[in-house]
Image: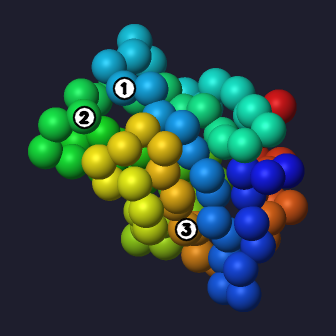
Amino acid sequence: MKWIRQREDGVDIIVKVVTRSSACKVESTGQDALKIRLTAPPVDGKANSELVAVLAEALGVRRGAVTLVKGARSRSKVIFARGISATEAASRLCC
């Protein structure tokens, strides 16, 4: 899977975000990115905060272990999740 990369202390997850959706959910995994729908608008970092919260809950880690690494003002983002392996993360996020 190209959308997840193992690092020494966690994983990088490549995400494509769709904002202002009717519900928050991990929708699909494409070849290059994990697609996540968020209800928050992309204003004042609200969508980024919601993305971190949604991923933390889906991965089963605390919110402080999930960090936005790249793409604060873009739909394509890189998220780092500390304390989880790529295998665990993929199984919790995928079908």
Q: Looking at numbered disc 3 in the image, what kind of residue is underneath it?
A: Phe
Instruction: Give the quarter of the figure containing the C terminus.
Output: top right
Residue underneath mark 3: 80
Picture disc at residue 19: 1
Return the x and y of residue 15 as percentages of the image width and height. 57, 45
Residue type at mark 1: give it.
Answer: Thr
Q: Position of residue 57 (x, y in %)?
A: 53, 49
Q: Crowding near pointer 1: few (<14 within 10 Å), some, many (20+)?
A: many
Would residue 57 be visible to someone looking at this image?
Answer: no
Between 58 and 34, the one lying in front of the other is: 34
Looking at the image, is mark 1 or mark 3 earlier in the sequence? 1
Residue plotted at (28% across, 29% down): 40
Residue under label 2: 42
Residue 89's x, y, as percent?
74, 57
Instruction: Give whichever of 66, 75 is nearer the camera.
Output: 75
User: Farthest top residue?
Assistant: 22
Compare marks 2 and 1 and give the one earlier in the sequence.
Answer: 1
Q: What whole-number distance in Å separates the C-alpha atoms at marks 2 and 3? A: 20 Å
